[in-house]
Image (spheres, helix red, strand yellow):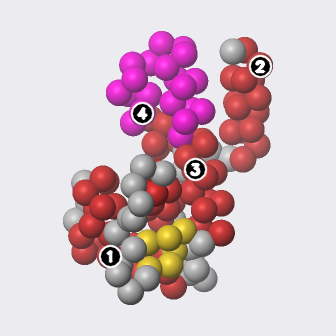
């Protein structure tokens, strides 16, 4: 099993987001959403399948495994909280979205949980 990289986290998060808004998710949907090439996404999804984070059925539909869903939900929560926090302190929505997407992958659990508590207490 590989240590999951930022790109893998982004693929898992995208599969989660897409699965919340459409009945089936395929690699091409992930590629289109992320504006990545189909071969890049196919490689990334292949690694996620090997590592047990994603299942692909015979129709090419992607489903997150329990471990894949846990990671995706963690990353997505970080994104949402960080984006809202940045907007609340005056960052433009476009910049907040871009920055949250970068920060969500590198911030420690301790720092994120502290930020989240502070943000929730001040709302």
Left or right for 33, reference 87: left
Instruction: Name the one closer to the observer, 27 or 19.
Output: 19
83 drawn magenta: yes
Which residue lies at the image location 29% right of the left edge and 71% below the top edge? 40
Residue 24: where, in percent of width, then height?
39, 65
Query: Quarter holding the C terminus?
Result: top right
- The answer to whether marks 3 and 2 mark residues whose Cβ atoms lie closer than 8 Å is no
For label 1, the residue is 42
**Which callout, 1 or 2, points at the residue further toward the start of the chain?**
1
Task: Indicate the position of residue 69 as horizontal and vertical percent values.
Answer: 60, 62
* Residue at image point 51% right, 85% down: 50
Highlighted magenta segment, given as a residue range: 79-98
Task: Name the residue tied to disc 3.
Answer: 75
Instruction: Specify which label sits upstream in the sequence, 3 or 1.
Output: 1
Q: Estimate how packed mark 1 is, as few (under 14), some (14 to 19) or many (20 or more) residues with alpha carbons within 10 Å.
A: some
Left or right: where does residue 1 sit relative to residue 58?
right
Calculate the distance from the C-alpha at mark 4 to the C-alpha at mark 1. Answer: 25 Å
Other-residue count near label 3 (Cα within 10 Å), few / some / many at <14 / 14–19 / ≥20 = many
Q: Which mark is residue 121?
A: 2
Residue 85 is left or right of residue 116, and the answer is: left
């Amino acid at each position: 099993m590989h240590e999951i990289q930022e790109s893998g986290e982004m693929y898992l998060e995208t599969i989660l987001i897409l699965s919340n808004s459409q009945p089936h998710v395929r690699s091409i949907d992930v590629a289109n959403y992320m504006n990545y090439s189909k071969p890049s996404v196919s490689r990334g999804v292949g690694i996620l399948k090997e590592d047990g984070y994603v299942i692909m059925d015979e129709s090419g539909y992607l489903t997150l495994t329990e471990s894949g869903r846990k990671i995706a939900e963690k990353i997505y929560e970080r994104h949402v909280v960080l984006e809202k926090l940045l907007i609340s302190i005056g960052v433009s929505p476009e910049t907040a979205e871009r920055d949250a997407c970068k920060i969500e992958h590198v911030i420690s659990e301790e720092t994120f949980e502290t930020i989240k508590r502070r943000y929730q207490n001040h709302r």
